[in-house]
Structure formats: C-alpha cells, structure tokens
Amino acid sequence: MQRTIFTEDHDAFRESVRQFIAKEITPNLPEWEDAGCIPRDFYYKTAEIGINGLQVPEQYGGGGIDSFLFNTVVYEEIGYAAASLGGFQVHLNTVLPYFLEYANEEQRRRWFPGFADGSLVSSIAMTEPGIGSDLAGVATTAVRDGDHYVLNGNKTFITGGIGADLVIVVARTSKDAENRRNGLSLLVVEGDMPGFLRGRNLHKIGIKSSDTAELTFDNVRVPVANLLGEEGGAFAMLGHNLPQERLSIAITAQATATAAMNLAIEYAQERMVFGKPLAGFQNTKFVLAECATELQAGQSMIDQALVALDGRTLTPADAAKVKLFCTEMQARVIDKCLQLHGGYGYMTEYPIARLYTDARVTRIYGGTSEVMKSVISKSLGI
C-alpha cells in the first residue's frame, strides 16, 4: 500500500539521509560495535546535514520543525540499513523533547546551540539497580542545600551514559507517604561535575555500537539552575513524552523488520537448494508472504500514529498498542527471516544476525510488553 504521510521535502531529505548512512554508518558499524560506542565526531557529521537540530528553534541554530516526520525518515533509514544506534536515537528522540518542553529561557540559551551543532550529547538516567519499571520507587535523592541540590544514588542500563555531556537524572527531592509518584524531579547533571562517576560500559547481546552505563552520583552538587521543569513534577513530565518515545521504538522495530525481510528475499533468490533457488520453494514464499502482511499491518499503525502525534492527539494507550504490536511483530519477522538463512543466519558476519540480537531489547526498554498490556487494559476500563 502506498504511504501518503510524506511530502516531496521528506523524500528529498530521505535521499540525503540514505546517502549519508551509506557513507558514514554502514562501512563503520562493525568498528563501532567492537568499540562499544559511536565516535564523538559522528554527532558533528549528523549536525552538518541538519539531523540533530530538527526540532530546536531557529534562534538557537536549529531547524524549528514542528513535525516528527523528518525524525521518522532518519530512523527508518537507519533501520532499513540494518543498523541500530541506540545512544544517538535516545539523545535526539527521547532526551531532547524534555528540554524542548520544559527548559526555561536561560537553559535554552545555554544548551540548545550545542544540541543543534553536535557539541552536546545527552542521556537520561531513570533505571536503578533493583528498580525497573517501577519508576515511583526511585531511591536516588537530591537534597536542597542553598543554590544547589546534593545528589546521591546509582543508575544502571543508561543508554549513552558513558559519553554524555548532559544527563537528565530522575531523583527524589521530597517524600509523599500517600503517593510515591510525588516528589520526583529532573536534574541536569553535567559531565564534569565532581562526584559524577561513570562505571563500566555494560556488555550487551545486541545494539553493541551503543554504550550502556552504570552511573554513580556521590554528593554531586547540582545547581538549582539545572532543575528541569517544576520541582516534584517529574512523574507527569516523564509521562508527557512517553507516546513519542514508544512510537520511536516502534518505528525502529518496523524498519529493522523490513530490512530483515529484504535480506531474506535477497538471500532466498541467490541461495541454491537441491538444484533450485530457495525462493522457489512454497514454504519460502509462504513465510515471506506472512512477513509482508505483518509488516503492512505495522506500517499502517505507525503511519496513523504519526499523524496523531503531529496533531497532538496520540494517547499513551494508542502509543502502547503500536509499540506492543510492532516490537512483537519485529521478533516474529526477524526470527522467520533468520530461519530462511539457515546456518548462515547464525553467523555474525551476516546482517540478519545483528538484527536478531538487536531486536530483543525493543520488547523491554521504553516499557516492557507487559507494561504496554497494562496501559492498554487500563484504557479499556479493566
């Protein structure tokens, strides 16, 4: 089915992004995976073609674009290239929206130009050891001391945390015995603040080009000027961006599943089995037909959600539905496509193997599939 949500401007931008990926990402991805991180100069290169500052207001050096469709183009093309750049995507799709929505004018002047030109890389620290989806259980504390907060605590599984210049930290600034969700605040910790310690780069089974950190805050003095938004209002603030964050994950899941099917088709046409191409067998045709149908369903959900997001009508429950379907579908499609590769699909030099391991986490981060089901069921009144 023909997609109708993009204009000629989006198509032209897509072509430039595709060329950039072919030159800067595809040939370098194995090296980045070995290093466990994306090199810093990559952010400057993406800034040069306008990716970093798409939503940053023009007066701070950005594009001032209100729509999320240009972002969608970028992350679709990364996925179509069988790549996953977790830290880069979190920086722009997850973290930047908090600054756009809640930064005051002084903070905007201080940080937005760095977002736009690639000189600032950001991350967000929510998850703690022993505390996963239960965000209300955050134990990291920030105690007011004059013009500073004294921050103490530990975070883990922080995407992009090793190299980030700015880390939004979810911390408890007060306690409410009746409602644990109250009293959480967002503090922006700068990379060179004394007491801010970065642990090891955690080893993962997938998305290996993205650094994932353990972070420790030992009496870090964070200026009150680095409070993002209203003190004590973090829980609602974090919920505000969840629809876009979850839709972003679904977009990547959809794109990488599409890449898997394309790889499987190419392999099936070239691979000879019992004297004829693998693509000639009925089972191969049926499996790929199933994948194509599931992908079409996912694409339709995503495109409808993108229209709702730009129209400010995408609800948390609808975003949860899209993430749940697309990430679960991604797992099914990529598994089937790997199976069509046979033993070669298990070899890491084949892109399908990377897609398989990269895909596993999409049903966990941004809210597990079980959390998505809980959100959806609540919207049904049950």
Image (tube, helix red, strand yellow):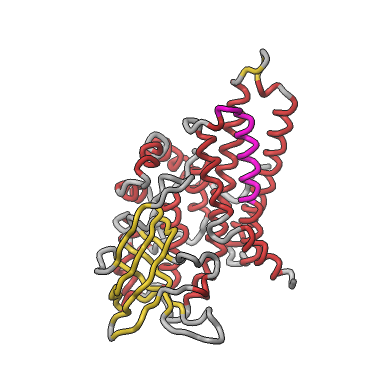
Q: Classify 167 as above or below 264.
A: below
Query: Extreme top residue here?
Result: 275
The answer to whether residue 15 shows anywhere in this view is: yes
Q: Quadrant of residue 283?
A: top right
Q: Residue at x 67, y 24 (%)?
A: 279
Q: Residue at x 38, y 71 (%)?
A: 153
Viewed as shown, does residue 91 lie left or right of 283? left
Total count of labels: 0
Viewed as shown, does residue 327 lie left or right of 183? right
Q: In front: 269, or 221?
A: 221
Q: Classify 76 as above or below 100.
A: above
Give the prevailing secondary structure in the magenta stretch: helix
Q: Position of residue 238 (x, y in %)?
A: 50, 70
Q: Residue at x 53, y 57 (%)?
A: 365
Q: In front: 104, or 194?
A: 194
Q: Position of residue 101 (x, y in %)?
A: 45, 70
State which quarter of the image contains the C terminus.
bottom right
Q: Position of residue 195 (x, y in %)?
A: 27, 69
Task: Report the magenta residues as a range.
Answer: 326-344
Look at the image and say whether residue 56 sits in the magenta stretch: no
State which quarter of the image contains the N terminus.
top right
Q: Quadrant of residue 118?
A: bottom left
Q: Classify 324 as above or below 16.
A: below
The answer to whether residue 51 shows anywhere in this view is: no
Q: Position of residue 202 (x, y in %)?
A: 40, 52
Q: In front: 282, or 230?
A: 282
